[in-house]
Amino acid sequence: MYFVDNQNNYDASVNIALETYLVENRLVDEPILLFYINEPSIIIGRNQNTIEEVNQPYVEEKGITVVRRMSGGGAVYHDLGNFSFCFIKDDDGSFRDFASFTKPVIEVLHKMGATSAELQGRNDLLIDGRKFSGNAMYAKNGRMTAHGTIMFKSDLEEVTRALKPNKAKIESKGIKSVRSRVTNIEPYVDEQYKNLSTEEFRDLILLEIFGVEKREDVKEYHLTEEDWQKVYAIREERFGNWDWNYGKSPAFDIKESHKFPFGLVDFRFNVKGGKIVEARIFGDFFGLGDIQDVEQQLIGVKYDRASMSEVLKNIDVNKYFGNVTADDLVGMLFD
């Protein structure tokens, strides 16, 4: 495995562009580990409706950056007390297998005293029932990234103020608020780690994962100037672009959503003359395909149970959504 240094860049749009570049371009024949820390920002899942996930007036007041990533999953708040880890490699069929990727991180945290840290549910790392890490995945052309966050000393009040989570997700977990279910990992590590900066804590985890004692002994791939030019081109095209991060969302006649075990699915339709003329699908599910493929196949379909059932049964819904059947989706729309 190689480590890639992001050169102490704290811009979320650049860091996510860098991760995307490493996924979409096979630079080495081994897995890659990437760490980054972002200035205050909200990172939106690929299929989420940004306006419905963020407290927009507060985001604008505080100058919080909003960036839509390539992977599915939910919105997360980043600040200088939080760092992200990304394992990037060829896709060997391990998509949605979060346990295999979070295991080395959990093992390191156990060594550092946080012995109760564990993977729970589909993609969260918890300690004492509280979440300190959310994880997501993205795959393209035989390459994938499994990435997550570590809340070390984040401002937990800002998490509450900046995000506007879907009520169904909160209710499904039997909790009252975002603030009540998140924690920093700092209180749980041994005393010698509690007063470290986020960067110092991150670097110790780096040494532990590589099994070395000095930073210079970490096996590293050094990005070239040409690599960085391509990273910034991706940033301009996607992650620094308002249309990408927010997107235009027309008003819809029909809205049906459901919280499945694998994630929230939210269908929006405009229907004229009994047929779908516009379709958008939002949610925090982890799909291998581009959800726009499904949206396009729904255009022109009669909005009734039989017609929707017929078209959805000809789509690989497991690929695009997760562990669900066409009948499940039809039932969500019409039952």
Image: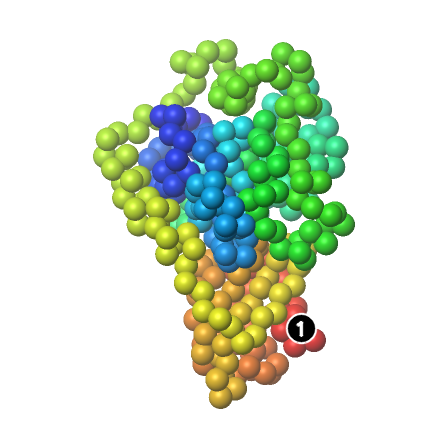
For residue 89, above or below residue 152 = below
Camera-side residue of 123 and 239: 239
Give the quarter of the image for residue 220: top left
| Residue 294 visible to the viewer | no
Viewed as shown, does residue 183 lie left or right of 289?
Answer: right
Residue on which the image places disc 1: 331
Viewed as shown, does residue 227 lie left or right of 163?
Answer: left
- The amino acid beneath tag 1 is Gly
Q: Quadrant of the N terminus?
A: top left
Viewed as shown, does residue 120 lie left or right of 153?
Answer: right
- Assign a secondary structure to mark 1: helix
For residue 164, above or below residue 199 = below
Give the quarter of the image for residue 106: top right
Camera-side residue of 110 and 154: 154
Camera-side residue of 331 and 63: 63
Residue at 38% from the left image edge and 41% from the top image edge: 13
Residue 285, position in %: x, y? 57, 55
Q: How is the image coloured?
A: rainbow
> How many numbered tags mark residues here?
1
Residue at 57% from the left image edge and 38% from the top image edge: 158
Residue 257, position in %: x, y? 62, 65
Answer few, some or many: residues within 10 Å of disc 1's Cα (few below 14, many 20 plus, some between 14 and 19): few
Residue 266, position in %: x, y? 58, 64
Residue at 71% from the left image edge and 32% from the top image edge: 127
For residue 41, above or below residue 277 = above
Viewed as shown, does residue 300 lie left or right of 308?
Answer: left
Q: Quadrant of the C terminus?
A: bottom right
